[in-house]
Image: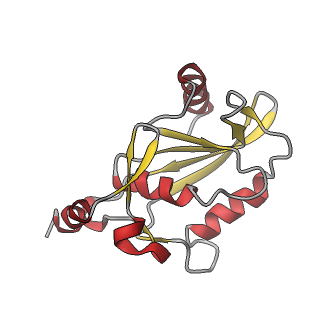
């Protein structure tokens, strides 16, 4: 991950006034937003994407005061199942986490890779497949229909 890619994604969000199909931006000042798991599922089940934490969409994608990078990073890693616990997702994707300085403040960039088709779908474990599988359409995480879940599961059998 390169700061120029991160900067370009933030500038694109500022021009658009929202995030998009390839980038989700969340404040997550000291607590990781629960909606992040739908975003991870959506990116994993579609074309991958970038999550940037520590910026306020409401205020025009500027850094938030009091962003606790280490705490939020650790919550994410634990939720992915890499903190010693079971994690929040079934079939979690490969990801990378990288802190960056942006406009003299810390932000956290997380790159989510698309899952190999043979391991799809990624879903929020406690919601099960019918309620926990998502896809990314523009700036939305959209729940997959039962038919879409079936298609993902059986595409390479």
Residue 87 against residue 37 in the figure, above or below: below
Image quadrant holding the N terminus, namely top right
- Please say which color scheme the image uses: secondary structure
Residue 115 against residue 56 in the figure, above or below: below
Farthest residue to the top: give it.
15
Instruction: Specify the quadrant of the image occupied by residue 75.
Output: bottom right
Where in the figure is residue 144, as x and y percent of width and height? 32, 58
Where in the figure is residue 86, as x and y percent of width and height? 55, 80
Image quadrant holding the C terminus, namely bottom left
Q: How many marks?
A: 0
Residue name at image x 82 percent, y 30 percent: 104
Residue 57 against residue 26 in the figure, above or below: above
Where in the figure is residue 142, as x and y percent of width and height? 39, 51
Residue name at image x 71 percent, y 37 percent: 56
Instruction: Specify the quadrant of the image occupied by residue 143.
Output: bottom left
Residue name at image x 68 percent, y 27 percent: 60
Farthest residue to the right: give it.
66
Where in the figure is residue 149, as x and y percent of width and height? 26, 64
From the viewer's perspective, is 115 left or right of 125?
left
Q: Is residue 129 or residue 104 the one in the foreground?
A: 129
From the viewer's perspective, is 51 left or right of 67?
left
């Amino acid at each position: 991950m390169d700061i120029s890619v991160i900067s370009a994604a933030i500038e694109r969000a500022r021009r658009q006034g929202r995030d998009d199909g390839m980038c989700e931006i969340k404040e997550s000042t000291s607590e990781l937003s629960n909606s992040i798991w739908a975003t991870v599922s959506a990116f994993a089940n579609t074309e991958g994407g970038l999550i940037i934490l520590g910026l306020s969409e409401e205020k025009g994608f500027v850094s938030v005061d009091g962003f606790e990078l280490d705490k939020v990073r650790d919550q994410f890693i634990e939720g992915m199942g890499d903190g010693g616990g079971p994690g929040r997702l079934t079939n979690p994707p490969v990801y990378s986490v990288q802190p960056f300085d942006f406009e003299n403040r810390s932000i956290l960039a997380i790159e989510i890779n698309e899952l190999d088709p043979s391991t799809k779908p990624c879903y929020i474990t406690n919601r099960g497949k019918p309620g926990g599988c998502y896809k990314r359409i523009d700036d939305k995480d959209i729940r997959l229909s039962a038919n879409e879940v079936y298609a993902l599961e059986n595409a390479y059998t």
